[in-house]
Amino acid sequence: MNAIEPTRSQLPDPLPAHVRREQAQQLVEERGFVRVSELRSAFGISGVTARADLDALELQGAVRRVHGGAVPAQPPGDGTGAEREPSFEQALEASVVPKQQIAQVAAGLVQSGQSVILDVGTTTHAIARALCARTDLHDVVIITNGLSIALELEQAIPRFTVIVTGGTLRPLQHSLVEPLAGMVLSQIHADFVFIGCNGVDSAGGVTNINLPEASVKALMLAAAECVIVVADRSKLGQVHLGRVGPLSAFHTLITDAAADPATLDSLRETGLTVLLPRTAPETTQRP
């Protein structure tokens, strides 16, 4: 006996476009970033329809389109004084050239046979890409708590060995945090750690918006011989909620060429070495 095919009237009616788009906007606001593929699965629609929904929401000012999906339209902060953490995808689109400058300097410090910890973040993601582009490097071990960074580094295997820390996944940054992340970090001692952040200040030290990630960053400081903070000029002089460590815990700052000279001078006065594009030496040693 043949199975009975459902008639068109028996199939569930699709959501009206205005209802679907309202729910899509809610998903973007809740998650910080939603992919086109996620909307296809959630609403049973085609990729063309999902993209059209996001385009319509962007025209309304409800979301901002980015590669592969959409992020909330509003800038960091909600008007109450509380900081809103940007998603990885939002940060990836910001300050692209400065991050590339920083990445080239950072990748130039690493030699074959060395080990590196790459913190989560879009600047360190750029470092991962720059390391992959260095075809002269081999036998490099890279430990990271960033899933996006691990995927970027996959192309360099087997020249690189890539180790991902354990921990709880934070979808906004695709990062792994406590519990468990510290277990891996407590068992290693790398040649370099490159720490991303939201603020570098002569008095406030290195800080981050997100507390769970700030905690893991602090653990990384003790897990490497040379501790380097990477931050574009927009983060210099800024102080945020989660303290990673005082400037005395860091050996070097790598920033971009347009950083304010007076701000850099105040950071150097704390004993911090500052590296800029075109001025970076081939190697750096612990003071």
Image (spheres, helix red, strand yellow):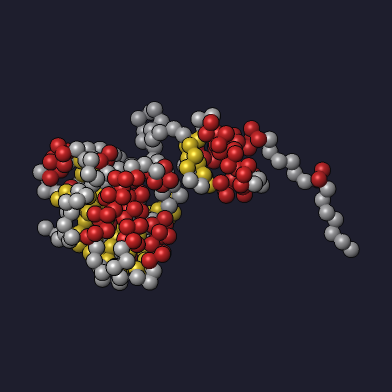
Number of marks in the rendered image: 0
Identify which residue, 5 or 209, lies in the foreground: 5
Please say whether residue 196 is visible from this viewpoint.
Answer: no
Identify which residue, 116 or 180, lies in the foreground: 116
Q: Considering the image in quadrants, where does the C terminus appear?
A: bottom left
Residue 251 location in percent, x, y?
Answer: 17, 54
Residue 189 location in percent, x, y?
Answer: 25, 65
Residue drawn 34% across the image and 53% down it:
126
Q: Is residue 112 found left or right of 165 in the rendered image?
A: left
Query: In the rendered view, would you say 138 is above or below 272?
Result: below
Q: Is residue 62 found left or right of 270 in the rendered image?
A: right
Residue drawn 32% across the image and 57% down it:
130
**Residue farthest right in this picture:** 1
Q: Considering the image in quadrants, where does the N terminus appear?
A: bottom right
**Residue farthest top in this picture:** 79
Residue drawn 18% across the image and 54% down it:
280
Identify which residue, 243 or 11, lies in the foreground: 11
Residue 40 location in percent, x, y?
Answer: 61, 47
Q: Is residue 51 found left or right of 4 in the rendered image?
A: left
Please say whether residue 75 is visible from this viewpoint.
Answer: yes
